[in-house]
Image (cartoon, rainbow, N blue to C red):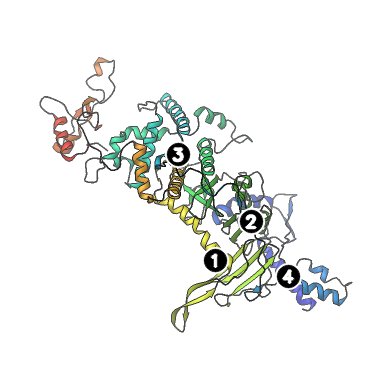
Amino acid sequence: MPRRARKEAAQTTLDSEEEFTLSSEEEGEYDDERLHFEERFDPAEDTIANEKVVPSRAPHTRTTHKHSSVFSAVENLEECEDGDQTPSKRKKCLSKKVQIFSWKAETDVDRVPQTLRFVPAREPGPQLSTADAHSPVSLFKLFLSESAMSNLCHSTNAQAAKSVAKGRKYKWTDVSVDELYSYIGLIFYMAAVKMSSIADYWRQDSIFSLPFPATVMSRDRYRTISWNVHMSHPDGDKENDKKRGKAGYDHLFKIRPLMDTIRLACKAFYHPRKNLVVNERLVACRANTEVKRYSKTKMTKLGFKFFVLSDSSNGYTVDFSVYTGKNSFPADRGLSYDAVMSLLDRKLLGSGYHLYMDDFYTSPKLLTDLFAMKFGACGIYRDHRKDFPKTSANSLTKDSTMGSIRWIRNGPLLCVKWMDTQEVSVCSTIHAAFTGDRVKRKAKIQDSWKTKILPCPAPVSAYNHHMGGVDLSDQLLQFYTIQHKTMKWYRKVFLHFLDIAASNAFILHKELLGNMTRKEFMEELIAELCGVSKKTAPKQTSTDHVPVPGAELTSDVRRLATVGRRNCVHCKAVRGKKQQTPWKCQACDVHLCLQLDRNCFQDWHKNVFKSGSSKMCR
């Protein structure tokens, strides 16, 4: 190639890189949040800058970005242009670079990369004895043990006492471990049986009435527990709030006790198989908190971002972390890099694992560092990210036919481009470029659609197969996910912890016994948590249906006839009148007249036992 043409090619490459140059450190900090949460870009990996020094908005501040790619075909080009070199040396230098850094086709033979020996730290699978009996509730309690529930009760009771001291008007009695398990059972029941509002589960004036929730606890009791459920002690919250804005402040203090318990259990009772997947989840929440994030590409736009490591074979959640901002990870090597590294513990996992990821995480530095740790990795990537090959020599174009393959290898790092319906870019340290895999695609040939058999790169086939573990994990959570409207952000996360515990418990049950569907497992779990049998419908008896005062008696004798009076539901429903009464049914929790000339209590309960269900107000 003539010297002038080579210079123009080099200048074209550098000019194309100018589009990605950041103008200042302040602009970089802003882009770190904006790009990640609106476009899922990681500025630490996506910045491709030239060698110019660009003035910053702030005075006396300049920043220089220098790009050096392991695949760059133009780096050190000036050495080859050195006039002191002989023509033969320059020709040898250029031919060597073209040979190494130009794209190769599927007909070129790629050497098989070094095989990493799979050495797990424990035998993969459930870390439980198959000889023991494992019911749904016993597996669920591996993640929410009675000890963890006792701490949860202690914090919840302390929070309720604090609320009552502030003047809340509801009556509170301390919640016990068994009652809190029953409360969680009702939460799962509501996830399985969808109603438009919480009050509808206790509504008894329509054909859609549900008798079960009222047999577990009253509506008011369920609501008061929901208002006060707390994972950390209120006194600790107060001390942590004093540190806001300082180094010792913990953004996740309110969820950390239960979060640490769930994470420890996820890793203790199951060891993952060879193929792992790293992905992110967004737990929906609109509460006004600094932990909340925005994601433009997700169906759920606002919420808490979880980075999740899961087993590709069954969707088991091996570990997770909650993103709290730029300083979430102390390594500070870029969000995508640090998020992956924070989830991998070689001492706990072992070596030889294969990790699959999407384009937000994939970078040459991450994959090469993982390979040095004896972790193979594979993921789709974005062409504009730094350190990926930028050469256009023999690359795919928009006119390339479907099934065309191009690849470049640099040591263990392999980059592959494949023309599907659009261009696909994959990077891997596990696979050879092409091993003969084929896929079927519909293509339009002479005004008709026909099926074509196309060659497919090995990394693309493996990526499509193993990233299905992300879909499986999300599906297990989505089908029976708990969606309650609440303005308390930590309660939203608490509900997601319950989802993780139930999903992982089901996977353990399936691995050990494999005799239940997810629906059957959840039905059995709900019944066991609530202390009933799912095979028998709840029966109503008259022992609890007795009249009691609608409010606590007052010491003021002048108010005895008026305190606690509410409208009688029977008078309103049958007679269309508003008659107030101080009496209510203990079991039904509705106000009913009890007078010599108007016994609504008796008339109401004739219909109750005739229909076999308790009548309750909204």
Secondary element at image label 4: helix
Q: Label for residue 49?
A: none
Question: Residue beneath label 4, please?
Answer: 100
Question: Residue beneath label 1, please?
Answer: 461
* Mark 1 or 3: the one toward you: 1
Where residue 588 appears, as percent x and y from the top left, is 24, 33
For marks 1 and 3 on the same chain, the one whose residue lies earlier in the sequence: 1
* Mark 2 or 1: the one toward you: 2
User: Closest to the observer: 516 or 426?
Assistant: 516
Please, is residue 185 above or below residue 27 in the view?
above
Question: Residue beneath label 3, please?
Answer: 491
* Mark 2 or 3: the one toward you: 2
Is residue 285 in sight in this rendering? Answer: no
* Mark 4 or 1: the one toward you: 1
Question: Residue beneath label 2, please?
Answer: 117
Q: Residues within 10 Å of mark 2 (few under 14, many from 20)?
A: few
Q: Residues within 10 Å of mark 3 (few under 14, many from 20)?
A: many
Please, is residue 38 above or below residue 73 in the view?
above
Task: Kindly identify the residue that appears in the image at 43 percent across and 50 percent down.
Answer: 510
At label 2, the amino acid type is Arg
Viewport quadrant of the N terminus = bottom right
Alpha-carbon span between mark 2 and mark 3: 43 Å
Alpha-carbon span between mark 1 and mark 3: 40 Å
Task: Kindly identify the residue that appears in the image at 25 percent across and 19 percent down.
Answer: 559
Q: Is residue 245 left or right of residue 495?
A: right
Please, is residue 459 above or below residue 271 in the view?
below
For marks 2 and 1 on the same chain, the one whose residue lies earlier in the sequence: 2
Task: Kindly identify the residue that appears in the image at 64 percent across and 51 percent down.
Answer: 334
At label 1, the amino acid type is Ser
